[in-house]
Amino acid sequence: MTDIHNVVIIGSGPAGLTAAIYTARANLEPLLIEGEPSSTSDQPGGQLMLTTEVENYPGFPEGVMGPDLMLNFKAQAVRFGTEVKQDKVTKLDTSQRPFRIWVGDPEAPEPTYLAHSVIVSTGARSLMLNLPKEHDLIGHGVSTCATCDGFFFRGHTIAVVGGGDSAVEEATFLTKFADSVTLIHRRGELRASKIMQDRAFANEKITMLWDSEVAEIRGDTKLEGISVRNTKTDELSDLAVSGLFVAIGHRPNTDLFKGILDLDENGYIITGPGTATNVDGVFACGDVQDHTYRQAITAAGSGCMAAIDAERWLEANLSPHA
Ligand code: NAP
């Protein structure tokens, strides 16, 4: 007979690992299913595994490497008794209690794990251009987060790809650091809100490159430039940039929860009050439910909230005195 875990945490970025630290210290003996190594950002450790230096995580005045930070989070969670499994959840069934969780074959008759409560922290991933070298140069000139990396581009010439609110907001933000920002958009008009467009058009550091897409990313150990194709004429031109910010949208890792948890129109899990989802006993934290802030520190904060919410819920619903 499979043991029933008090709490199973799905996902191992800052949110999931913080939830693990807190639930472990509350003696709930959490099981954390961390995902499987892959080339995308839903890998163990989350998006910070794809970054280099993190300078804005409080407590590290000299900065810290993203992967080191996540290894420290994990060591802290394990120290207090978190059990970690390197597996990918393939099915969650909340129609009966305890909740049933599968890894591996989702058609297997019996679930792999049983849980009284579940914390979902599967994160989100940045959409990428899927060009050669793009992935390898993340943290070496290619970035998906202006808030995180803008500071490294003081005095540089950079480009931002995309035409939505994210791209226009990031381009405007990046002019605080960079000498010049080229906004590369595949069409002749932006999707971004009018007010953000006006702000960008009025910013003399921003140059628009309409009807254009990145055709090639150059550089071996760091970004050395890109080539851009005009989508109307097919003409190629070189752009000498030392930074390329890809801002073409994010996708929350919520395919697993469709039809189970309430999602908003962009696929993010709807939470509230606190980190509660529509299923009693299932909580969500981090980027999987936050498309606004998307920072390691805010994800960690909401992981703490989910742990406290789960602990209180277990106390109210499962304790012998409940
Ligand atoms: P988005 O609105 O989906 O825009 C994505 C942009 O990237 C579009 O302009 C799209 O071009 C372009 N794009 C998509 N795939 C591409 C590809 N493979 N190559 C080149 N370009 C590509 O995404 P978002 O800007 O991240 O915004 C997501 C949501 O968050 C929106 O609802 C937005 O309003 C909101 N948001 C709000 C704020 C704010 O209010 N402060 C800030 C950021 C985001 P097309 O236009 O041709 O489709």
Image: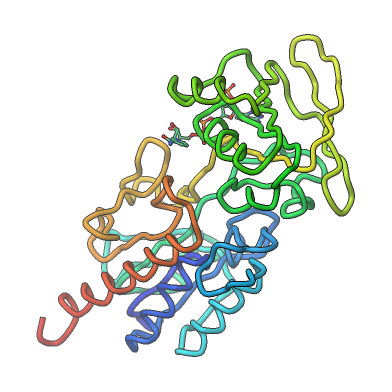
Of 194 and 26, nearer the camera is: 194
Toward the left, the furthest residue is 321
Of 117 and 264, nearer the camera is: 264
Name the residue rendered at 70%, 33% in the picture. 180
Toward the right, the furthest residue is 220
Q: Does any portion of residue 293 appear in the rendered image?
A: yes
Name the residue rendered at 75%, 10% in the picture. 232
Toward the top, the furthest residue is 233
Q: Quadrant of the C terminus?
A: bottom left
Which x, y percent locates residue 223? 82, 45
Of 243 and 278, nearer the camera is: 243
In the picture, measured across the screen, residue 206 lies left or right of residue 294, that is: right
In the picture, measured across the screen, residue 134 lies left or right of residue 116, that is: right
Which x, y percent locates residue 83? 49, 83
Of 48 and 35, nearer the camera is: 48
Examine the image and state in which quarter residue 96 appears.
bottom left
Name the residue rendered at 35%, 74% in the picture. 115
Q: Is residue 198 above or below residue 130?
A: above
In the picture, measured across the screen, residue 275 lies left or right of residue 222, that is: left
